Image (tube, rainbow, N blue to C red):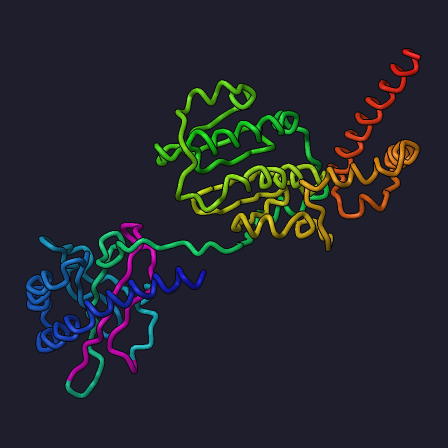
Amino acid sequence: MRTILQKTISAQRKILVDLLKQPLSQLASELLPDISNAARLESHLHKAFPVFQHCKYLYVMDHQGIQITQTILADSSEPKSLGRDRSKRPYMQFDFTANKFSLSEAYISKHNKRPSVTAIHVIRDSQEMLVGFLGVDYDLRELPGTNHLYKENYKWQQIKGDPAIRSGLFAQQRTQSDMDNHIDNVFSLMQALICEHGIFHGKFHFSSSRTTIWLLDDPYNYRLLSMDELNDPDICLAYPRHSYSKLARVPESAIPKIFEYFRQLRFADETIYLRAGSINIINGMISLNFSCDGSHYLPYQEFLDKGMGFWFGTEEEVDPFQYDEVIESICGKGCEYVYNFINQHRQDNNAEEFANIPQIEQDKIVKELETIMQVYANKCTLENNQE
């Protein structure tokens, strides 16, 4: 469990310990003289119940963990619990030889199936012999002091998925989805929705060709967009214009770069590929789910800083927004070099210019080079005809 979450839980437990330790000690002392009289024990518990205002049940057990009173509730009691063996319950698995008080870890209650905790105080006679236990049960929903909001620690987390999926990973291959075929349009539309229409969280389900979105003006409900909506720019008319949130941790300028990395992770490998990805501009987090069923959660800047090399094991990285420089460098070596470069690529011979560029990006660059050379060839033909 993460450190900050542990600290939050520990703080809540301390509040409960401070509330219970002294009152339980006092009640245990009052119960001792009547430890053999169930009716009088129950009378003590009824009178003491208001002191434990947040508790669910009070009861007394003998030294073996067998309940010797009814279970006392705020305004009633449960006779059927008399004689119940509680010795095997989680809250009794504690070394009481040197301690008089314990607060259990949270557990699921046996009868009500609710997350609960139990405080136990031992009852000892004047010779320090163990004669019983005083128990008080709490439903976690009713605990005092638990209304402080836990604040997430936004650091990179990696979570392994289903082992069955991972074991069959190399028997699968990415299938081109409808979203894959229109991915640039989908990203452009989502960028417009985020930057201009109040969407603060968007998730791309690449394999199933859908997105889910959350709006700043209606954060409790999500919308599901199919490819019919994602292929229609008119969808923007369904969401009012909304300025980019001042609460956003992700700057507008980073969004296209994030989407570009999503696209690369989707197409870079036919076996290990991005299955789903999301962006939350308010908390600044990126989530990634891969075909191996592994998931990653990390801050957007860390996601961009890692680059493609982190995900695919290359040491250096070419920024996708610097590919124009690669194209210019190749074109600067002359037409013959460009033609040879394209032919070599078709024969799967990698040039040094492609040393750190994923396969899908190599194909895009070569396609751009082919377009450039086609334009150049048409221009030369036109000039020759004019002569």
Compared with 150, 96 (above or below) is below
Residue sitting at the far bottom: 127
Q: Which of the two residues, 76 or 138, is positioned nearer the viewer here?
A: 138
Who's the residue at 86% across and 36% down the image? 345
The quarter of the picture where residue 179 lies is top right
The magenta region covers 97-125
Q: How far across and how far down the image is residue 176, in percent?
A: 68, 29
Who's the residue at 81% across and 31% down the image? 369
Q: How far across and how far down the image is residue 91, in percent?
A: 31, 66
The quarter of the image holding the C terminus is top right
Q: Does the segment drawn in magenta span residue 100?
A: yes
* Residue 259 in view of the camera: yes
Who's the residue at 84% across and 23% down the image? 376
Who's the residue at 56% across and 52% down the image? 302
The quarter of the picture where residue 200 lies is top left
The quarter of the picture where residue 324 lies is top right
Q: Which of the two residues, 17 or 339, is positioned nearer the viewer here?
A: 339
